[in-house]
């Protein structure tokens, strides 16, 4: 039983066309993961390739637009609009409600950037110009006021500290026999 | 609100989008219906698998598999062009030499100052 299995394995090994450890061990690809036709491939050049790629990604042929072929490593992956998941309808019954995505829907290349914890491209409540004016107005005003404060400081009036006992004559090491000069720090 | 200008890279609110009001045509309707048909097909597949009482395993999502595969295997489609090599150079080679130069000169200057005795330890707490 084991001998028969070993012989079959040796025969498969000699006939296998693949390279590498996987071919040595089994002589064929694993059945897990997508089949070769369902995984992303290289940039489509002919219209048939484009149609096949659109069908593979579950997009209409007219909607399918691959990334331009500039050698940046995208292959035939579709270029979907750069919209965040924040913008999707919160009330529709998505298959995955936290991701706001249906099963089998083509994912954006930067999907993990556009999830609801991260980048948000939804429209701002106030328009861009108002936002700029408010932010830079506030920052500018605060910088200006701090600058004025530096130029014209304002604080409680202070004087050097005054010490008793003739400016602490004995404590500062003065001679106990000698009579120090009288220091008057006040006036009544 | 007529002169609303959206933030760069953000979208316009749907109520201010002119396409919603002006560019409606039967072709757009047909396109929307085709997209809805694709979406309904995928929904049907998912619901069939989800509600199958004999299913014991996870439902595998081929779109997710494709996305992961595409993101982790860009090299077969990589081609050294002017832009990609420039980017590679700017991110991989230039910081190496630039940081070496910056750190070396800064440390040499500090060493010089310490040797001369002109090193000003501003926030030193131990002396």
Image (tube, coloured by chain):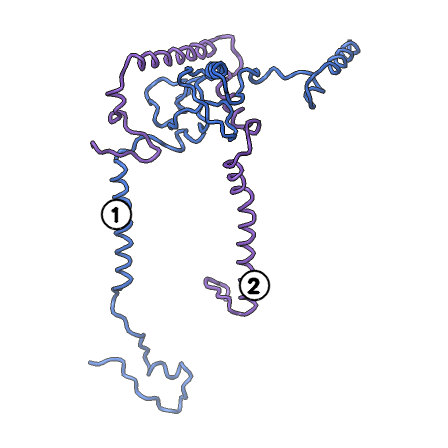
Chain colours: A blue, B purple
- Residue found 57% across the figure and 16% down from its top: A36
| Left or right: B4 in relation to B82 | left
| Left or right: A105 in relation to A121 | right
Rendered view: A163 above or below A51? below
Q: Which residue is mark 1?
A: A137
Q: Which residue is mark 2?
A: B111
Q: Quadrant of the N terminus of chain A?
A: top right
Crowd tier of the residue under label 1, counting other residues whose Cα lies within 10 Å: few below 14, some 14–19, many 20 or above = few
> Residue A177, position in %: x, y?
40, 91
User: Contact, CB < 8 Å: mark 2 with mark 1?
Assistant: no
Asked which secondary structure carries label 2, the reply is helix
> Residue B44, position in %: x, y?
42, 10
Distance (Cα) linking label 2 and label 1: 45 Å
Of all chains, the one bearing label 1 is A
Rendered view: B122 above or below A141? below
Q: Which is more toward the observer, B9 or B49?
A: B9
Q: Which is more toward the observer, B83 or A74?
A: B83
Of all chains, the one bearing label 2 is B
State which quadrant residue A81 falls in. top left
Asked which secondary structure carries label 1, the reply is helix
**Furthest residue to the bottom?**
A178
Crowd tier of the residue under label 2, counting other residues whose Cα lies within 10 Å: few below 14, some 14–19, many 20 or above = few
The verdict on a common chain for dots 2 and 1 is: no
**Furthest residue to the right?**
A3
> Residue A152, position in %: x, y?
25, 64
State which quadrant residue A129 falls in. top left
């Amino acid at each position: 039983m084991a001998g028969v299995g070993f012989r079959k394995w040796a025969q498969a090994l000699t006939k296998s066309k693949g390279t590498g450890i996987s071919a040595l061990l089994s002589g064929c690809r694993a059945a897990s993961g997508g089949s070769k036709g369902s995984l992303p491939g290289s940039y489509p050049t002919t219209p048939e390739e484009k149609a096949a790629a659109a069908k593979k990604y579950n997009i209409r042929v007219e909607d399918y637009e691959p990334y331009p072929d500039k050698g940046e490593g995208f292959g035939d992956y579709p270029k979907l609009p750069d919209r965040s998941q924040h913008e999707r309808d919160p009330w529709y019954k998505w298959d995955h409600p936290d991701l706001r995505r249906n099963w089998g829907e083509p994912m954006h290349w930067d999907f993990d950037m556009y999830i609801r914890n991260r980048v948000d491209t939804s429209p701002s409540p106030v328009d861009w110009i108002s936002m700029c004016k408010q932010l830079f107005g506030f920052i500018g005003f605060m910088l200006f006021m701090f600058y004025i404060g530096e130029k014209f400081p304002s604080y409680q009036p202070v004087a050097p500290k005054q010490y008793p006992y003739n400016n602490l004559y004995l404590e500062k090491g003065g001679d106990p026999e000698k009579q120090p000069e009288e220091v008057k720090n006040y006036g009544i | 609100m007529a002169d609303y200008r959206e933030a760069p890279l953000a979208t316009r609110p749907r109520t201010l989008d002119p396409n919603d009001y002006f560019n409606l045509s039967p072709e757009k309707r047909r396109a929307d219906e085709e997209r809805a048909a694709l979406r309904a097909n995928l929904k049907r597949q998912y619901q069939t698998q989800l509600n199958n009482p004999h299913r014991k395993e996870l439902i595998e999502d081929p779109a997710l598999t494709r996305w992961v595969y595409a993101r982790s295997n860009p090299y077969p489609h990589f081609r050294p062009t002017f832009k990609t090599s420039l980017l590679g150079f700017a991110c991989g080679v230039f910081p190496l030499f630039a940081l070496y130069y910056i750190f070396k000169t800064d440390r040499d200057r500090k060493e010089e100052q310490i040797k001369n005795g002109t090193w000003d330890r501003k926030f030193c707490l131990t002396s």
